Image (spheres, helix red, strand yellow):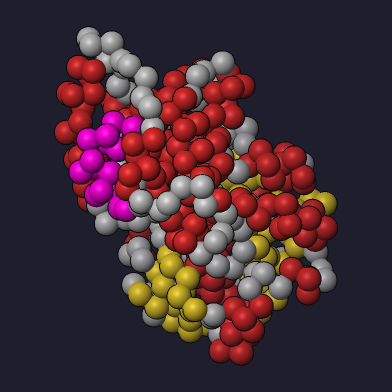
Amino acid sequence: MKLAIMGAGSLGTIVGARLSQAGYDVDLIDVNAAHVKAMNEKGAKIIGLMEMVQPVKALTPEAMTEPYDIMFYLTKTTQNESALKYVAKYLKPDGAVVCMQNGIPEDAVAEVIGKDRVIGGIVGWGATWVEPGVSKLTSKPENMTYDLGELDGRMTERLDQINTILQSAGIPEKQSNLIGIRWTKLTINSSFSTMSGVVAGTYGDVLDSPKALKCAAHIWRESLAVARAADVIPEPIQGFDIRILDCNSEKEYETKTPIFHKLITPHRGIRTGMLYDIEAGREPEIDTYNGIICKWGEKHGVYTPVNAQAVEIIRGMWEGRYKIEPANVDRMKLPELPAE
């Protein structure tokens, strides 16, 4: 069986290294030529909460020559246009792509390679790309989880196969309601990762700003409204049902503000990757987060004005129309909620 990691960045480097260590025939594919060169010459090096150096086979997309049975797709969604043409060309007719991107990525991939060849895969851990050949694991190895699922919720032989493969790179679990898990993560990220970008700070800065926190709550509320209209049932995260934080009146918001603080405080130090992208001149994945909520809202007749404003501000920061500064939160206009 021939495997590929398409997008061997921070996460893909670690997944590829661990699968190579387990004896799988896997290619690590990435557009960063210096990174590819370093991995081929010195191996894939993992630091942080895991220390290892693993010889791997790495290549750029232009160097791909053979078909793959399974491709673990980890490129940023902003790179889909360039990356998916290689996936379409080199995936075997009976092969499968495991979408491990942020947001709700399966539809875009299915449009190119066919819905029957797509499997959803949610990565439940974090890493940071350090330099060519080096990735830093920022989650404990025992927390390296994956949620896997067929788009129609069925339990299949190929899902079993992919589950077995990923046991060498963490703790996979097969799911029948993958979209529900995706929507839970989408709601949290669209609320707090995006507002972290708007205020040019951390999740803690969002919590500490009454206006930013209220914006996050409105984004959360709109996301849940879209989920209901789309017949999506969000799955609990670590036993917490995100629907508890649906705020449809000022009184509800006041009552539930302490719950937001309790849920997010352990993650106060997180600074959204969108800020790093903007600062580096890269396109942020805002369309992958709030943009998806707006798109699904339009499809299902749900008005999502706060999400739309968040998209406009983040894109404005990237395009240079707005400065990268906390004052951007003042650009957001919130709809009035009933008192009770």
Query: What residue lies at 82% left-to-right and 51% top-to-bottom?
Result: 93
Q: Can residue 87 be seen in this view?
A: no
Prevailing SS of the magenta stretch? helix
Q: Can residue 339 be seen in this view?
A: yes
Figure check: 106 above or below 320 = above
Query: What residue lies at 59% left-to-right and 85% top-to-bottom?
Result: 38
Q: Nearer the viewer, residue 322 or 185?
A: 322
Residue 215, image quadrant: top left
Q: Which of 317 and 266 is in front in this view?
A: 317
Figure check: 136 above or below 216 = below
Q: What stretch is highlighted in magenta?
A: 201-216
Q: Position of residue 49 (x, y in %)?
A: 34, 72
**Residue 207 inside the magenta-drawn segment:** yes
Q: Position of residue 182 (x, y in %)?
A: 49, 39
**Residue 53 inside the magenta-drawn segment:** no
Q: Position of residue 260 (x, y in %)?
A: 24, 36
Q: Nearer the viewer, residue 309 or 97?
A: 309
Query: What residue lies at 33% left-to-right and 64% top-to-bottom?
Result: 140
Residue 270, image quadrant: bottom left
Q: Position of residue 138 (x, y in %)?
A: 36, 66
Q: In this view, does 151 lie to the left or right of 233?
A: right
Q: Nearer the viewer, residue 166 or 307?
A: 307
